[in-house]
Image (spheres, rainbow, N blue to C red):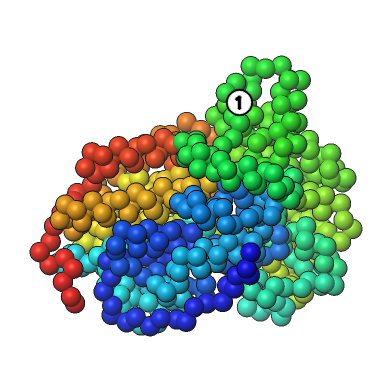
Amino acid sequence: MTAISDAPAEIRRTSAKEFDCVVVGAGFAGMYMLHKLREFGFSAIVVEAGTGVGGTWYWNRYPGARCDVESLDYQYSFSDELQREWNWSERYATQPEILRYANFVADKFDLRRDMQFETRVTSSVWDDARARWTVGTDRGDSHSAKFLIAGTGCLSASRLPDYEGIDDFKGNWYHTGQWPHEGVDFTGRRVAVIGTGSSGIQSIPLIAEQASQLFVFQRTPNFSLPANNAALTPERVSDHKSNFQAIKAQARQTAGGVIANPNMTSALEVDPAERESEFETRWGQGGFQVIQAYADLLVTNQANETIAEFVRNKIRQTVKDPKIAEALAPRDHPLGTKRICIDTNYYDTYNRDNVALINIRENPIERIIPTGVRTKEGDFEVDAIVFATGFDAMTGALLSMGIEGQAGVKLKDKWAAGPRTFLGLQAAGFPNLFTITGPGSPSVLSNMIISIEQHVEWIADCLAYLREHGLDTIEANLDAEDAWVDHVNELADKTLYPQANSWYLGANVPGKPRVFMPYVGGVGAYADRCREIAADGYEGFTLGTSAKAGAPA
């Protein structure tokens, strides 16, 4: 396989150009959307803040960054030729390998010629009279488009904590979601990592191998399961390639977009010894298999406690210091109600002499000082700080686009009490605006590639339908939106998910409304509903015409 460069294409200055579609973001959503729009004969430009493609895999280059979906599942299915040409090396691919894959796709389909890099969308204003969006950027461009499609990603708006004194720190500080492309060498340095979500759990073991001293500041312990990562054998890769389309078709009908092995028995209906044996088997398999062990693990607290205590015991067996083990053992949320982390040697890291765990619930951070981190009980002097503090998930990137719909209503105002969409695809009052894997869709509870493909294909089919029927606009009805939001909430309330203060609810961002954002009904059921709505002439949407639609500015 030839080496793929992620060097950017020349920045295209396209001020005041007219397009059928402006797509925001050159991650996996934006890349496939562009490819699909070309296939359907629509003109489009992709606007991307980075210097290259890849989205989350372009930005998140921190040590240990990996996908928590197996690499054979985390790839496009729209081109059989593509999947036959690309070979994954490991069960769970690293960030560099996934970024190489993104660049391979961009090269194969010549996507960069319709992309504008190093450009952020700063305003997106709907003109009702012309039935068009005007999209402004930080480069002074003004793109006009009939349709605005946000492929901005669910985890792309990095969030720094609001600690005082960050600018006073004399060393270097980093956010895992905005990692330097040249990498960071922590050899011999004293390092603070603040946050123990997924990026913290992935990066801490590798940083600990370099640092002379690592201080881990933890507010809330998270459940983490072993990846049991390994190189992929040629036999497994070959078998997967041969059965790829059948595997993908089946995955699209599952709950999470991945073929799993769910056990439909209740955890409470089996003998404790049998239950323990089932957990052990799935623990040994690695990844998310443990949560599939019984049907009610995410439904009742009593069932969930059986798997939660199993994992806590694994932590106790691994971490030698009993006090540290208990501090790492979550007790404030059911297992799986925050996104489960997948790790390699995370808990073992706390057996190292150069690693210390600081519980910032008991010993809160008061501020950042020039020499390090000040807590209630004292100062920690460090040479570097890593903020593994996550994202303004699912809505942050969308709201940064300055979106204004009909009558000048801002999306941030409409969503002031929490995001409201129909199907996670459109918001009432914002015609011709589509959100790929937006709030109210399976998105982060699924294999994102599967959900991205389903949304992109639905949107492309919708645009083709409008063109075929001489229609210019499509907008979600308010009644349909209200009913969908109620449905999303009703399903979530039947699970344990709302019990956790997770980023699924926006709980990691001070002041953000607590609303459960993803759709828990499953990828297959969701896709079926989307198909039914389209087959019914886009029931729940208002389709219209405008004599001035598409007229030049």
User: x, y (%) of residue 431?
Assistant: 24, 57
- Extreme residue in the left direction: 547
Which residue is painted at 65% across and 54% down in the image?
A: 88
At horizontal 49% and vertical 59% (from top left) the residue drawn is: 28
Q: Quadrant of the C terminus?
A: bottom left
Q: Where does residue 353 sit, x and y in percent of width and height?
A: 89, 58
Q: Quadrant of residue 190?
A: bottom right
Q: Is residue 326 left or right of residue 415?
A: right
The residue at which mark 1 appears reads as 263
Give the structural element (helix, strand or loop) at label 1: loop
Q: Report crowding for label 1: few under 14, some 14 to 19, many 20 or more residues within 10 A (C-alpha).
A: some
Identified at 44% across, 68% down, the residue is 111
Q: Is residue 124 above or below residue 277?
A: below
- Please, is residue 210 above or below residue 514 in the view? below
Instruction: Name the kind of residue labelled 1 in the image.
Output: Asn
Percent x, y of residue 314:
78, 38
Please name whichever residue, 455 or 169, is drawn nearer the observer in this view of the structure. 455
